[in-house]
Amino acid sequence: PNDYGLWVGLGNALTDHARTLTPAARLAFARAKQIAPRAPAPDYFLGLALLRSGQPEEALTLWRELLAGAPAQAPWRPLVEDG
């Protein structure tokens, strides 16, 4: 489907099930970003999956890039900044 939220959910479910970020979960997050390139959710949740998979530096890099391209008043900024 062309619903990025469903793809993000699939990426989260696959990561939760495997207890690590899998290639299939990466694909789901990438598909979500392809559908909605300006939505913060794909990168935010990919960052969480990376963090939970023992890759904190990659997660922080991704979140910094997400914040760098975000409007200063984006309502979701505090969530990412506190992540």
Image: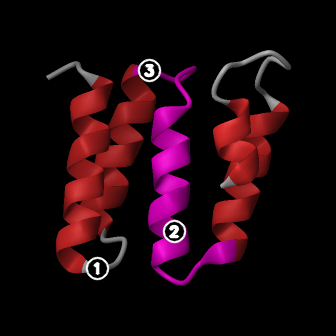
Label 2: how many Cα within 10 Å (few below 14, some 14–19, many 20+): many
- Inspect the image, locate mark 1, and give the three-letter code of the amino acid beneath it: Arg
Write the start and end of the magenta stretch as one range.
36-56
Question: Which one is nearer the viewer's eye here, 47 or 23?
Answer: 47
Asked if residue 8 lies left or right of residue 77, the reply is: left
Nearest-to-viewer mark from 2 and 3? 2
Q: Position of residue 61 (x, y in %)?
A: 75, 59
Q: Main secondary structure of the magenta part?
A: helix
Spatial CA distance of label 3 from label 1 is: 26 Å
Of callouts 1 and 2, which one flags the residue occurring earlier in the amino acid sequence?
1
Q: Position of residue 12 (x, y in %)?
A: 29, 55
Q: The residue tagged with tag 2: helix, strand or loop?
A: helix
Residue at the disc numbered 1: 19
- Inspect the image, locate mark 3, and give the three-letter code of the amino acid beneath it: Ala
42 relative to 34, above or below: below
Q: Residue at x 73, y 62 (%)?
A: 60
Q: Residue at x 80, y 15 (%)?
A: 73
Asked if residue 3 lies left or right of residue 60, the reply is: left
Q: Residue at x 64, y 63 (%)?
A: 59
- Inspect the image, locate mark 2, and give the three-letter code of the amino acid beneath it: Leu
Residue at the disc numbered 3: 36
Dots 1, 2 in contact, CB < 8 A: no
Asked if residue 42 lies left or right of residue 18, the reply is: right
